[in-house]
Image: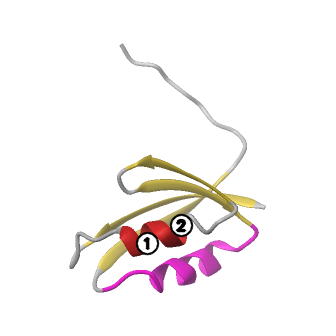
Amino acid sequence: MSTYFVTYTLKDSTDYTKLSKRLKKYPNWAKLFARAWIINTSHSSKKVRDELVEAIEGNAKLSIFSLTAKYSKCFLM
C-alpha cells in the first residue's frame, strides 16, 4: 500500500462533492484541510490521478505526492 498527499483546486466550479466522494472510496483517507487529503491505496500515483480526473468537471489543478514513513512535526505558539 502507498500513501499519497492529494491537493487540488477547481477553476470552473465550486462544487467539490464529486471529487470528495471519489477520494472517500480509497481504503483509508483523511481530509486535512478544505482541499488537502491523505489517502492510502495499492494504486500507483498515475492510477490515482486518472481516477480523480474522472471526478473533475472543467479546469482544475491536481497534485499527488507520495509520502514515506519518515516525517517531522513542529508546534508553533
x then y, percent, for residue 57: 33, 85
CA separation in Å, label 1 and label 2: 6 Å
Q: Is residue 16 above or below residue 75?
A: below
Question: Is residue 2 shown above or below 52?
Answer: above
Would residue 42 appear left or right of 60 to someone viewing this image? right
Tag 1 secondary structure: helix
Q: Which mark is residue 23?
A: 2
The image shows residue 8 at horizontal and vertical percentages of: 38, 65
From which residue to which does the magenta span run? Answer: 42-57
Question: What label sits on residue 68 in the rendered view?
Answer: none
* Image side of residue 68 versus residue 57, left or right: right
Q: Vertically, is 11 above or below 8?
A: below
Q: Specify the label residue 19 is tagged with.
A: 1
- Report whether 16 appears left or right of 63: left
Residue lying at 34% horizontally and 68% vertically, measured from the top left: 16
Q: Residue at x 23, y 75 (%)?
A: 13
Name the quadrant containing residue 72.
Answer: top right
- Tell me what residue is drawn at x 70 percent, y 39 percent: 70
Kind of residue sitting beneath label 2: Leu
Query: Would residue 44 be counted in the magenta stretch?
Result: yes
Q: Secondary structure at mark 2?
A: helix
How many residues crowd around disc 2 within 10 Å: few (fewer than 14), some, or many (20 or more)?
many
The residue depicted at 56 percent of the width and 81 percent of the height is: 51
- Identify residue type, mark 1: Leu
Q: Does the CB distance between marks 1 and 2 fall below 8 Å?
A: yes
Compared to 60, does 73 lie above or below?
Answer: above
Residue 17 place in picture, x, y as percent: 37, 69
Q: Position of residue 66 (x, y in %)?
A: 62, 59
Q: Considering depth in this image, is 34 or 74 the residue closer to the camera?
A: 34
Quarter of the picture containing the C terminus is top left
Quadrant housing the N terminus: bottom right
Q: How many marks?
A: 2
